[in-house]
Amino acid sequence: MSDQSDAPEADPEDPAAAGSDQDAATTAEVPEPAAESVEPEGPRDEAREELLGRFVEALGDAVVDSHIVVDKDLWIRVSVDAWQEAGQVARNQLQARYFGFLSAIDWMPSPFGRSMDSEVDRLLDSAAAADGQADTDDEVSEASGFEHGFAGGETRFQVFARVASIGNQANNWGVTLKVDVPDDTLALSTWTKVYAGADWHEREAHEMFGIDFTGHPALRNMYLPTGFEGHPLRKDFPLLARHVKPWPGIVDVEQMPTSDADAAEEAGPEGVDA
Amino acid sequence: MTAITDRQKLQYIAAKAADARVNIELETEGMILNMGPQHPATHGTLRIVAKLDGEQVVAAEPIAGYMHRGYEKLTEVRTYPQITALVNRIDWLGSFANEVPFILASEQLMGIEAPPRAQWIRTLLFEMSRVANLILFLGDMGVQLGAVTPAFYAFRDREFVLDQIEAVTGGRFHPNFDRIGGLKDDLPKGWLVETKNVMNKVRSFCDEIEGLFMNAEIFATRTRGIGVIPADVAMQYGLSGANARASGIDWDLRRDAPFGFVYPELDWKVWTHPDGDSFARFWVRLQEVRESTKMIDQICDGVPGGPIMAKVPRIIKVPAGEAYVATENPLGEMGFYVVSKGELTPFRVKIRSASFNNVSITPWLLRGVYVPDIITILASLYFILGDIDR
């Protein structure tokens, strides 16, 4: 059973493996130089499919969605009620005793763009807006409208954690478990009872995203001073330094083209004025 | 049970009373000991608040955050090529090693791969960072125990390694040398020969360190059996790297997930130690430096010719998707969870740094130890503050 560590033969992976399972809409506008496209049905990953099967067997309907990138990784999204159970199943039944990390993601598009505060940035944004994609003025309220990543999602916030089975030479495997955090309560059951190491990670996710982990012994701030207002890693938390002063690194990005068409031309042999 | 005589009863009561008197005299009040944030034993600005009962720690709480730089937020407003300059500063003793997992994650999303020569040189510099990083650990462990000599040896020999890194990348500390699809530059002329010389020096440094430590009784008494981490606890807290291997977990991402590297083509060994104590963690790292020097020698002999960059578009836009790539960094598993939406900047980057997990075990580990052992245990866990706070 080969797996995440699909080990000793470091043969070149097929270049299109990553991201090939993406829906066409998201990958279409990306200029892809090297990748010849492979149909999503092409390669199969039996080891990960079997692993997914074991999760489904143990958790039943609680497995909402899943995603496999062949020879790379497995994503499983579980329902919010089964979050703690999913950890228990992974650790106790499937022997994923190693706790990698736990964190969260805010799927709301940033209302501040790239905060580069430059002519180029505004041009890029206006070009994007003209294309009708990535409208930067999304409202927080229409939570279901966000574009989610692998294994889908329904809420603005998702928590994801990585656990692995290690120390068995060639049979190591890892999985990323995801869960939707309900928009109204922003609460989730804690994993500290399953993996003791989740303690600090949940504290970090709590202060950075404002997600509540019920049952956590002490959700104190990890990094921020006590009484800090706001949750810095949320997309609607502005990066204040950028709004006070133009970013000095702007020199680097000044030559960026204003649209994809320009990018394609610039990559080509004859240079075009930006 | 035979009947207890009155005399015995009286003796018993007298003994109890004596005990009680002693206890009253020696009764201790709990005391809070603050270590740091500027304590020399903490490698940066980690603060430990320990509640003591006499010499014993009842509870200890590490407080991080004095160095938090918000890289996860900053990555959202930087383009992919600019991010290597940020992640360089996570574990500043092995900077190049920080860039690699991020680059590999980006490459995985883009579906490109570095050419063979770039992979060999990447592996080479990756191991050089490990040597530069762990040499300092080997020297520093002495300082924590009151022996200053090893630190001087360490700084002396680490300089040779840093000189080599500087000769290639132009930076002693922050190379910023890895690129999506390959490397910034090729190796300078004559560099490989000099590198092998340096590796000889590093090996003799390891011998010196071994001579200084392994026969020292003080070192043995202060590290053997101190701060024992069982394998299962280590896994629960996500301990990785030498800390996990010192607890007997046979797990090394260089061997188990070598994607993007040339480790399978090299002859080397993963060292583990069954004890899980401070001594084991020191010993495993010492062997790892030796193993790395061997690998570097082999790479110097085997590095193939060819280009060092794959064909990469000038403007790097990473296709939408998610990827988690972790590598075996000097401090342990360092991973980047990159979420892309097909733009110039990542949508979210989660940095899974080794020290964060490695230090999160300290409240569990420090319970019940004696005050002087706090220092050796923290030193043997070996963390870099930038790697905790990010």
Image (cartoon, helix red, strand yellow):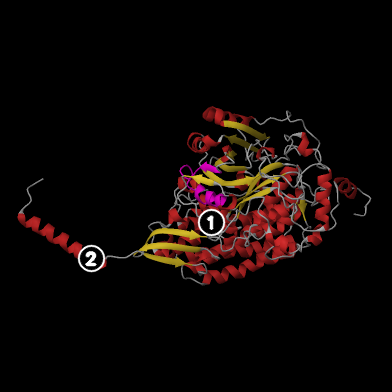
Q: Is the C terminus of chain B in the top left, top right, bottom left or bottom right quadrant?
A: bottom right
Tell me the magenta residue range.
A186-206
Crowd tier of the residue under label 1, counting other residues whose Cα lies within 10 Å: few below 14, some 14–19, many 20 or above: many
Residue A40 percent across, percent down from the top left? 74, 31
Secondary element type, mark 2 = helix
Up/down of B15 relative to A10, above or below? below
Residue A167 percent across, percent down from the top left? 53, 42
Crowd tier of the residue under label 2, counting other residues whose Cα lies within 10 Å: few below 14, some 14–19, many 20 or above: few
| Residue A192 within the magenta-colored segment of the rendering | yes
Query: What is the C-alpha distance between the residues marked 2 and 1?
Result: 39 Å
Residue A44 percent across, percent down from the top left? 69, 30
Q: Which residue is mark 1?
A: A222
Q: Residue furthest left?
A: B6
Q: Quadrant of residue A255?
A: bottom right
Along the horizontal axis of the image, is B386 left or right of B40?
A: right
Q: Amino acid at mark 1?
A: Met
Chain under label 2?
Answer: B
Secondary element type, mark 1 = loop
The residue located at (48%, 64%) in the rendering is B213
Along the horizontal axis of the image, is A215 left or right of A238?
A: left
On the question of residue A75 being in view, the answer is yes
The residue located at (50%, 37%) in the rendering is A95
| Residue A274 within the magenta-colored segment of the rendering | no
Q: Are marks 2 and 1 in contact (CB under 8 Å)?
A: no
Res. B24 mark: 2
Mark 2 vs mark 1: tell me if same chain: no
Q: Which is more toward the observer, A112 or B328?
A: A112
The residue located at (17%, 64%) in the rendering is B18
Q: Is the N terminus of chain B in the top left, top right, bottom left or bottom right quadrant?
A: top left
Up/down of B332 relative to A59, above or below? below
Residue B234 percent across, percent down from the top left? 48, 48
